[in-house]
Image (cartoon, rainbow, N blue to C red):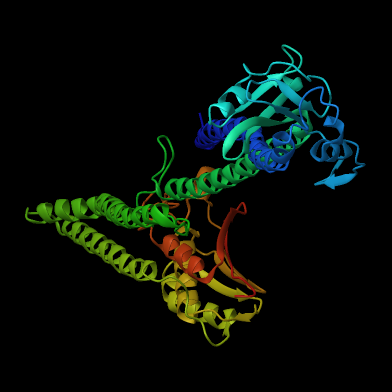
Amino acid sequence: MRLGIRLLFAFFLINGIAAFFVLRVFMAEIKPSVREVMEDMMVDTANILAELASEDLAAGRLAAGASNSSASPFAQHVRRYATRPIDAAIWGFSKQSLDYRITVTDTTGRVLFDSENRALGADHSQWRDVARTLRGEYGARSTRDVEGDDTSGVMHVAAPIYVQGQIAGVLTVAKPTRTVQRFIDRAERKVFMGGLLLLALSAAVGVAVTLWMVWNVRRLRDYALSVQGPAEGERHDPGAPPTPALAVPEVPGELGDLARAMDRMRARLEGRDYIEGYVRALTHELKSPVAAIRGAGELLHDDLPDADRAEFATQVVQQSERLQRIIDRLLELSKLEQRHHAEGRAPVALHACAEAAIAQTRARAGQRGISLTLEGHGTSGPWEAELVTLALTNLLDNAIDFAPAGSMVRVELEGATVAVQDSGPGVPDYALPRLGERFFTTARPGGERSGSGLGLAIVQRVMALHGGQMVARNTAPGLRVGLEFPVGH
């Protein structure tokens, strides 16, 4: 399972469990909380009405069946309350009825007054609200009008009626719970919708955090892949300079620390691998001339004819020169690889660089009977003249090695491109992509392999410093190597 899916799954699991319990607590607490507030208000109402009813109860005007009970000021006020017109907008709901039912019982629990005239004379002494209030305790109860129907519940709250400091009766205020159910339902809907919104916002935050985390981790992964060595089976030039890695990802916190640690590790590993590959390739290239010099030197100790002695001495000189060329070009390449860009300031003409390179190689070309020509004019640009001349000199040396005696090597200029064209055998197609690798050489026309394999590597590095490229192709006959400099460099 991928990291992003795991993070999302874990986040949704935690968030879902938390949302479930939070919503459950809220939904479970709404109804009791509303009824607690309702009971609190009914307690106040019951005690106020108990004080108002105390005078009529003491005078006997509330006795059941009393001829003057209907003339009781308390009873008249209560009945007028029940018939009052009402149209109140309460937080979006319309209230059009008054729902209190008021009863008064004596000290035996017999009903003396009922605002709805449903229980006059009934014995309520066993009802919890009346019984507890008569004992001087707080009395309240909730009873269903219809058995098994939760919506038919009625809350009763009682208060004692005092006459001369003694409990003379009980006043009970009753209110159906269905009158507040719509408020409960609306509150539950709001809590539920709010919970869903919170869940959606949390999910969005979770997705955003997961995407951020996965994006940063993938940046670290890509960076790690860019600095690792070649996979098994991939061709790798052991002498080639380290491939530039991606920039160190700018990520916060511990991920940033990890990125910087990876960069330090990369630098150490690249330095070690670079030196190891460099030494291995260099050792391989030095083996042949050293072995040849040693063999010739051992033979020179023997008594040899003058012709053989001269041949072996010439071989020692040639192999020594080869060693010298390898060392000189390694030093040049090493200097170039320490640099990150060319230092061109004033415009440099490719034509002048080509003339300088031809002047440096004309003597060697003349020894092989090869003529050098310059065609075109080219352009100028902010390039480093010394490096451009160095690259062209190496190209000309390479072309002279492959060109047949008596042939011509042309230097062609066109815009920001300079190309060296010879008329030699070219190179095998498989070798074209490898031209420019350090120590990679191909056989000369005579079968000898005297090249150092560093000339084109120097050219590649010069072009990399200028932001250009080297392009080689067979022209049958010959090989054409072009240097394409960036126009806007």
Image quarter (top left, top right, bottom left or bottom right) of the C terminus: bottom right
Name the residue nearer the viewer: 115 or 325: 115
Name the residue nearer the viewer: 476 or 286: 286
Q: What residue is shown at x 73% (from left), y 11% (from top)?
A: 147
Q: Position of residue 472 (x, y in %)?
A: 56, 56
Name the residue nearer the viewer: 92 or 65: 65
Is residue 450 toward the left or the right of residue 195 in the image?
left
Q: Position of residue 125 (x, y in %)?
A: 63, 18
Q: Position of residue 360 (x, y in %)?
A: 43, 78
Q: Give the quarter of the image for residue 126.
A: top right
Q: What residue is shown at x 40% (from left), y 71% (from top)?
A: 339
Is residue 445 toward the left or the right of residue 372 in the image?
left
Q: Position of residue 256 (x, y in %)?
A: 41, 56
Q: What residue is shown at x 59% (from left), y 33% (from top)?
A: 167
Q: Is residue 422 visible?
A: no
Q: Is residue 249 visible?
A: yes
Residue 169 position (above or below residue 291): above
Q: Residue furthest bottom?
A: 346
Q: Give the quarter of the image for residue 107.
A: top right
Q: Give the quarter of the image for residue 43.
A: top right
Residue 343 position (above or below residue 405): below
Residue 366 position (above or below residue 440): below
Residue 209 position (above or below residue 186): below
